[in-house]
Amino acid sequence: MPFTVFHMGPGILIKSLLRGSFSLMVFGWSQILMDIQPLIALMTGIRPIHGFTHTFLGATLIAFIAAFTGKWLSEWFVSNMCHNLGRRQRALLDIPDRIKLWVAVLSSFTGAYSHVILDGLMHGDMEPFYPFTKYNGLLHQVSTYDIHQWCIYTGLAGGVIYFLVRYSLVRKVSDEG
Ligand SMILES: [Zn+2]
């Protein structure tokens, strides 16, 4: 999927359920890393568009890279870019200063593998199970329209759940304080 943003929908829903045990920033970072190779293919005309990075094997390598670099990048981003946020905004967004390594690994693997599954349902040039087989059994099991709808609605539902829970927690703390 050249539009990485659609992949964020399921990630936002997972974040709303797993909360501190999931990093949406590392998940998002893994989506960006996954789509670098297709972007280069589109710009240069080199084919296939969805190459080795869009196999489960390639995604495993990308997930490891995304976990370590994403953890470091996210922590750098929070310590350098989020200091202007007020206490209440920080509490509402629940931004952690540090990301545990297992949280980064869980988030990057969820990101990379969900990316292969979603793209595998849509793109005829994908071979998700390479080198074991070139056959893509995922292709067209769900229509592209339904996938896009699903990504949008999971994102919206996740956003609503996340902020409703955070808002009620922050209000409870303010009331008690
Ligand atoms: Zn992709």
Image (spheres, rainbow, N blue to C red):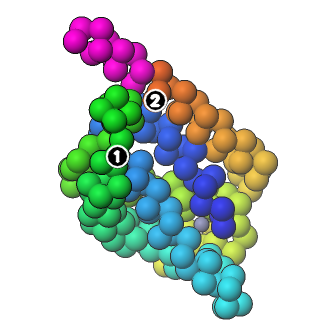
Q: Which residue is mark 1?
A: 84
Q: Is mark 2 within 8 Å of ligand 1?
A: no
Pointer 2 residue:
162
Question: Residue sitting at 60 percent across and 60 percent down?
Answer: 4
Residue that sits furthest to the top in the current view: 176
In the picture, the disc for residue 161 is: none
Closer to us: 131 or 2: 2
Magenta residues: mostly which secondary structure? helix
Q: Give how far across and how far down residue 77 sits, in percent.
A: 33, 58
> Dot 2 surroundings within 10 Å: few (below 14), some, or many (20 or more)?
many
State which quadrant residue 21 falls in: top left
Task: Give the percent coordinates (x, y) of residue 79.
Answer: 26, 54
- Residue located at (32% from left, 64% from top): 73
Query: What residue is rendered at 50% in x and 62% in y?
Result: 31
Distance (Cα) linking label 1 and label 2: 22 Å
What segment is highlighted magenta in the picture? 166-177
The answer to whether residue 145 is left or right of residue 106 is: right
Kind of element beneath mark 1: loop
Does the segment drawn in magenta span residue 170? yes
